[in-house]
Amino acid sequence: MRRTSRINPRALSWSIGAGIGYSFVLTVIMALSSLIVKGFYPPFEFSIAPIRSLIVSPLEGVVQVLILLALILFVLPIRGNAIVRELTSARNLAIYTSAGYLILSLLPYAISTGYLQAYIGLVIAFNLINGVIAGLASQISLG
């Protein structure tokens, strides 16, 4: 008899959905932090990509990276034995989504266009791609 994958399809679909949602939440948080920094220091331009912000406006980039690290640190502690697997899954998902966000958030800036609709479409696309990859990676890492 052939052995199939041990990944639960239902858990995988929930993980992918949560990854997509968390990626959109990260985008909203980074956009708000960019607007707040722009409010205090007007010469900075709006950016949702922390790596690009580190190059274009270092203060904004540092703030965005610190916020991303704080969100990762928020999910790290696991106490108790009752729900260790679920919390480990959530922790892995948050770490993979945040790491993917650092790289994939550069997508809207890699393809330059003058249309706002294209920028918004690229933001939606990288969030979907990031969520799917992070959800799949978090389920594979659980084994």
Image (tube, grey):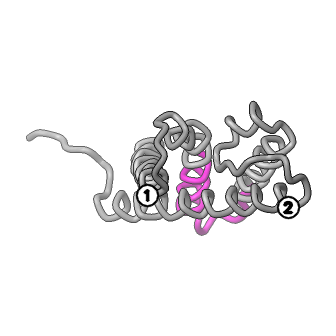
* Of 3 and 127, the residue lying toward us: 127
Q: Residue at x 53, y 55 (%)?
A: 89
Q: Which residues are magenta?
A: 77-95
Element type at mark 1: helix
Percent x, y of residue 56 = 75, 34
Pointer 1: what residue?
Answer: 117
Type of the residue with mark 2? Gly
Residue in the foreground of this view, choosing between 65 and 113: 113
Q: Is residue 26 visible?
A: yes
At which x and y percent is residue 124? Answer: 44, 56
Quarter of the image with the N terminus in it: top left
Relative to 69, 112 lies left or right: left
Identify the residue shown where x is 46% and y is 36%: 111
Q: Residue furthest left?
A: 1
Is 63 situated left or right of 32 in this image? right
- SS type, badge 2: helix
Q: Does 76 appear in magenta?
A: no
Which residue is denoted by mark 2 in the rendering?
39
Q: What's the residue type where badge 1 is placed?
A: Gln
